Image (cartoon, rainbow, N blue to C red):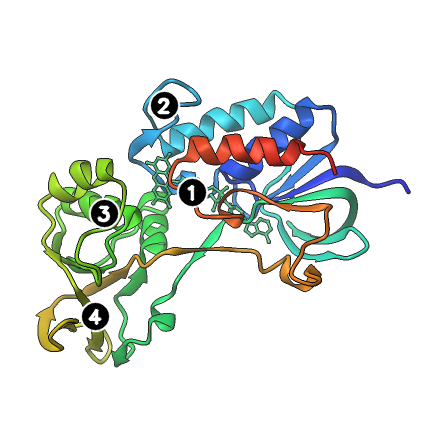
């Protein structure tokens, strides 16, 4: 059988870029599709340092890290398809791509699924009360503020205290916002110890532990949240105009689900990066993605 391309890479974040480069270096013809203007995925939203000490021996921002990879891609034989979404992957090893102005079907020998992760939405958190404006996920705020230069509210409460929330809370505090509290259901904050020191503690973000948000208030716009202390059930009202949920990432394997048989994916379809499992350190993710992409079928 002759294929249009040896490998289709779905997603152009760190995982997709690392896998595509490894495969091209090994002599494969590779097409990498990503909906963004330029490859990078989550990295394009990360203006903080902490990336690339393992791979490049430097402390880079996420955006700088992505730019390094884009340079390597330009020097490689990988065909990058920006502004292109893979709509479906079919059992006969074809995929439907939606790119600028056209739908296209291409066939491939193998497919690397590097579609990243999605965030738990505020809607999935079963918050009581009204549905006012001013409630965002952390990823949405990162995109609005760091990629598109938009503003959000002024008096902010975070729900969830992992790395993503801590970094964003410190950035917003540095930009002059009032971060009133970070509400965490566990008895200690989440995230890497390094981030706790550099962001949460350095920015003096108030933590409310063993607690969660149970209710949103406000008609058109958020005016406050109810916070419940879980061990006692005691509730209190905190006035704010913005709630940011940072309650975890979920591997995005939705494109692969219809191809599962007896709980297994076909051997020609290989998930890598956050799509496989959620990684804290991008260098580890990039190294694993290279390795997985090169494992022979
Ligand atoms: C806020 C934050 C801070 C972080 N800080 C650090 C840090 O300081 N140091 C560190 O080492 N690591 C850090 N990480 C971890 C690291 O950056 C990520 O784990 C990594 O960048 C994820 O790469 P990925 O390629 O798996 O996913 P993503 O970057 O999410 O890329 C997936 C890409 O696939 C695309 N896609 C999805 N569906 C389709 C489709 N159907 N068709 C085509 N394309 C599709 C998406 O648009 C996206 O561009 C951080 C992560 C976050 C979220």
The mark nearer the N terminus, 2 or 1, is: 2
Q: Estimate how packed mark 4 is, as few (under 14), some (14 to 19) or many (20 or more) residues with alpha carbons within 10 Å.
A: many
**How many angstroms separate mark 3 from mark 2 (CA)?**
21 Å
The mark nearer the N terminus, 1 or 3, is: 3
Determine the residue positioned at 91% across, 42% down.
Answer: 1
Camera-side mark, 1 or 4: 1
**How many angstroms separate mark 2 from mark 1 (CA)?**
16 Å
Q: Is mark 1 within 8 Å of ligand 1?
A: yes
Give how far across and how far down residue 276 sits, in percent.
Answer: 53, 48
Determine the residue positioned at 47% across, 52% down.
Answer: 117
Which residue corresponds to mark 4?
213
| Discs 4, 3 touching: Cβ within 8 Å | no
Q: Estimate how packed mark 1 is, as few (under 14), some (14 to 19) or many (20 or more) residues with alpha carbons within 10 Å.
A: some
Q: Mark 4 falls on what kind of element? A: strand
Determine the residue positioned at 12% across, 42% down.
Answer: 201
Answer with left or right where residue 125 lies relative to residue 31: left
Determine the residue positioned at 52% across, 55% down.
Answer: 252
Q: Can you tell which mark lies on residue 279? A: 1
Quarter of the rendering containing residue 197: top left
Name the quarter where the C terminus is drawn. top right
The mark nearer the N terminus, 1 or 4, is: 4
Q: Can you tell which mark lies on residue 53? A: 2
Q: Mark 1 falls on what kind of element? A: loop
Give how far across and how far down residue 50 sits, in percent.
Answer: 31, 31
Which residue corresponds to mark 3?
166
């Amino acid at each position: 059988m002759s294929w249009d391309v040896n490998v289709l890479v779905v997603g152009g974040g760190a995982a997709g870029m690392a896998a595509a480069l490894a495969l091209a270096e090994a002599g494969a013809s590779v097409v990498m599709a990503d909906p963004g203007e330029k490859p990078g995925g989550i990295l394009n939203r990360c203006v903080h340092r902490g990336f690339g000490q393992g791979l490049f021996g430097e402390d880079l921002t996420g955006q700088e890290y992505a730019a390094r990879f884009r340079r390597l891609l330009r020097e490689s034989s990988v065909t990058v398809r920006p502004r292109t979404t893979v709509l479906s992957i079919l059992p006969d090893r074809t995929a439907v791509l939606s790119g600028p102005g056209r739908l296209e079907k291409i066939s491939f020998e193998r497919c690397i699924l590097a579609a990243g992760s999605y965030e738990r939405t505020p809607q999935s958190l079963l918050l009581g009360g009204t549905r006012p404006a001013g409630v965002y996920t952390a990823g949405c705020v990162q995109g609005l503020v760091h990629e598109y230069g938009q503003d959000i509210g002024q008096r902010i409460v975070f729900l969830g205290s992992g790395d993503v929330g801590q970094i964003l809370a410190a950035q917003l505090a540095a930009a002059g916002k009032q971060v009133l509290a970070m509400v965490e259901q566990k008895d200690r904050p989440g995230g890497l110890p390094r981030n706790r020191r550099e962001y949460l503690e350095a920015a003096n973000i108030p933590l409310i532990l063993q607690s969660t948000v149970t209710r949103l208030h406000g008609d058109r716009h958020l005016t406050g949240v109810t916070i419940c202390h879980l061990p006692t059930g005691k509730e209190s009202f905190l006035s704010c105009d913005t709630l940011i949920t940072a309650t975890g990432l979920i591997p995005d394997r939705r494109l692969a689900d219809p191809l599962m048989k007896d709980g297994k994916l076909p051997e020609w379809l290989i998930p890598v990066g956050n799509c496989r499992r959620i990684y804290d350190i991008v260098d580890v993710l990039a190294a694993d993605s290279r390795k997985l992409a090169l494992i022979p079928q």
